[in-house]
Image (cartoon, helix red, strand yellow):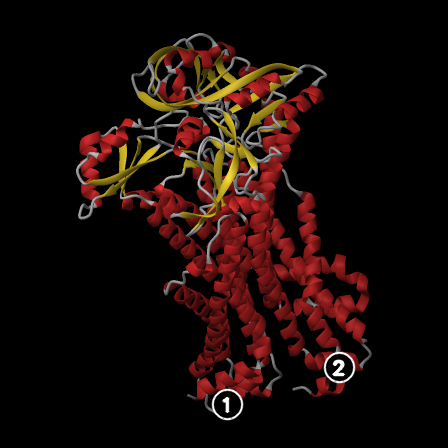
Amino acid sequence: MTVLKTSLRNFVAHKGRMALSAIAVLLSVAFVCGTLVFTDTTNATFDKLFASTASDVTVSPKGVSDNDTRQGRIRTLPGAELARLEKVNGVKSVTGDATSQSITVADRNDNNIGADSGAPTIGTNWDPTEKRSVKITSGHAPHGPTEVMVDADTAKNKKLKLGDEVRVIAIPGEFRAKIVGIATFQVTNPGAAFLYTDTDTAQRKLLGAPGAYSSYAVTAQPGVSHEQLKKNVVADLGTGVKVQTKAESSAEAEDDIGSFLDVMKYAMLGFAGIAVLVGIFLIVNTFSMLVAQRTREIGLMRAIGSSRRQINRSVLTEALLLGVVGSILGVLGGVGLAVGLMKIMGSAGLHLSTDQLTVKPTTPVVGLAIGIVVTVIAAYIPARRAGKISPMAALRDAGTPADSKSGRIRGAIGTLLTAGGAAALVVAGNADKAADGSMFLGAGVVLTLIGFIVIGPLLAGLVVRALATVVLRIFGPVGRLAERNALRNPRRTGATGAALMIGLALVACLSVVGSSMVASATDELDKSVGADFIIGSDTGQPITKGIEQAVHRAKGLTHISDVKMIEKARLTLPDGRTVTKDLSAADPTYAEDLRTPVVSGDLSEAYGENAMSVPEGLAKDHKVKPGDTVTVAFAEGRTARLTVAAITSDDVTLDKGALYLNITTVERYLPAKLMPADTMMLAQAKDGQEKAAYASLKSQLHHYPSVTVRDQTDYKKEVKDQVGQLLNLVYGLLALAIIVAVLGVVNTLALSVVERTREIGLMRAIGLSRRQMRRMIRLESVVIALFGALLGLGLGMGWGATAQKLLALEGLKTLEIPWPTIITVFIGSAVVGLVAALVPAFRAARMNVLNAIATE
């Protein structure tokens, strides 16, 4: 009981000093709990949506995939099946669904009204099943080919209203219609844009198959189970269609959204883990300094009879209190963070209602466990150190001398770990296979990180002196005082710098990898792409006939290459084995537009009659050589015997592993109705007419917002922007760890000022001005921040360079160090140091000189 009282007294007495550590715990726990609450809420919302929209039994075409949308293929079921299904035993009613995701809807200004998130635009017929998820809140249901209805979120985001005209671009063709109704989702909008038509219009204009449906929703009669109804339907229709119960179709939809949410969840938890790791250093430093400051107090307690165990338990109890307070606030903050994430997703079109806010019992338990356990573990070493303080310490000044023996052991362990990690990175950089090298890369990253953390105090002595020579010495005596303060306790400086090092190491690593990816892609484009223009969709929408015709109307072009993807062709190779591959069918000019190097043969001949190319890897595995014959069975088409005209190199990034053949060859063996739409088109401008051709293409395709025209400059910029957006997202998540690290710098300086109260008073008494005092504290903070930045950036660049060596095995061969980013981060670290020192420096300068000198 005495230990508890002492711990409570000390905790309350030092609550100001504990505040920043509590904030670190709060932020880390909030990030974990916020991630869990957000993903649980999203899962619960979609579970409710899928459960409310799924039919008792759903019948759909077999083998439908996302590639069907990208290739413009719409698989349908004959309308006659509806009447047949109505007669199946146990069926109460059947509703036909006519839905297509291969559409783009443009407003009167030719702007795409689809979701900005990249989710598809879904066109469907307004039928009774839709009323399960949405209700008409304005206008009326569509009737006839000139009327459509849109969802409320799309109407709001794209500023659409009743009476507005839209143009629907679908595989069968285009049509115009007026918005006559607006429907609101009763649970949530799954993120897509929805367009509703009447059934006849959906069948003719969206599916291009009058009387046909994309699926059937079957309702069971009372007393008939979904499983029994499924058996009855399969018995009648056979296995040529896909039949699912309500539970099965809901589970499939949940898996689709769940896989995305799982990636998001574990990525965010990973960054939360980094913040927790950084927070450990802050807590360790806090308790180490508090123990050092209370050396005489602890010595007196030992002198009057307190045991080592009691002292140890007292410090751990304080850590427990800190963990409990920080974790409770963190759990509450996590709920707030989840609500904030829901609002952000709402702006992207995915509305999640707070009415569905899901806080599972395990979430606060996980949050409290992480916060409390981490805090207590972090405080364990300072607690042990406190327990070792002898009664004689009561007769000495505060502070305990460093253990030189433990310092040497620590230095030796850190050196071994760092050397082992460096060796693993070297092995990874020289690996022959990316999969093998990635294991050594992971080991190298972990070992070097731990090694630098362990060896931090030794490095602090060396690096801080070097930095002081450049940064501090120019400030004269004040600079020398700042240097000595930073070197006074290398262990503390090392731990403070290590907290900042972790976040900046990841920033530097990802910057190197990102810059190398952009540089490699740019070099590959320069070497491989001969076409001046690339036409394609950013959202996977197919290139319709209207778009093809618009491209061919452009002026100033020498040739245009159509490119199609032929799915799931079965190849019987010369060695007798059979493989299933996708084929790249294109016009012969594609060989000029994409200069794929060949190992043997002539690629231009692969576009000849009944000819093809195979990639190097496939050729090696199956001993294929030019002149060999490959039997190709086209899915749902006839079988061809094609001659191998070329073996293409695998030492490429673009179209690696592609099998090329002429579109006319495919047309001989695949029915016209099954020919996929173009996945992209490439065009070459006439010499000297590049700008005019570019403008002509832009003009012709202005009315087709589903596709984008890019020249090589645009494409390079697009690659750079995409990598940049990804890096900015990662930097944003890493910001949490860096914020916690900055709190560590602030806390270290604040406690250091308290520790040096008497010293500060004496320095002020002998003539040090307030301005000089503030400058000294700020310079100390800057050199600590630069120390952490130097270690982190150096370590991160090493990781990034090694990662690029592995990426080079996959075709990304250019290493580029983003020096502007590295230099900016380094300078930014100095600014962070200045900002972190503002409050501690102000407090130090405002101290009463006589009171400070009198402090024991």
Q: Quadrant of the C terminus?
A: bottom right
Measure the alpha-carbon separation of dots 1 and 2: 30 Å
Drawn side of residue 88 relative to residue 578, left or right: left
Q: Which mark is residue 435?
A: none
Name the kind of residue labelled 2 in the image: Leu
Callout 1: 10 Å neighbours few (<14), some, many (20+)?
some
Q: Residue placed at 44% from the left, 20% from the top?
A: 659
Camera-side residue: 450 or 337?
337
| In the image, farthest residue toward the bottom | 304
Query: Where does the image place residue 646, in percent across and percent down from the top left?
Result: 46, 13
Q: Residue placed at 61% from the left, 70% from the top?
A: 747
Label 1 SS: helix
Camera-side residue: 430 or 733?
733
**Mark 2 highlights which residue?**
762
Residue 838 sits in which quadrant? bottom right
Visible residue check, residue 646: no
Query: Where does the image place residue 614, in percent across and percent down from the top left?
Result: 43, 18
Visible residue check, residue 734: yes
Above/below status of 515 relative to 346: above
Drawn side of residue 134 relative to residue 536, left or right: left
Label 2 SS: helix
**Mark 1 highlights which residue?**
303
Callout 2: 10 Å neighbours few (<14), some, many (20+)?
some
Name the kind of residue labelled 1 in the image: Ala
Query: Where does the image place residue 563, in percent across and percent down from the top left?
Result: 50, 20
Q: Residue placed at 63% from the left, 58% from the top?
A: 788
Are the residues at dot 1 and dot 2 in contact (C-beta closer than 8 Å)?
A: no
Above/below status of 792 relative to 620: below
Q: Quadrant of the N terminus?
A: bottom left
Camera-side residue: 753 or 569?
569
Residue 533 sits in which quadrant? top right
Query: Where does the image place residue 138, in percent across and percent down from the top left?
Result: 49, 47
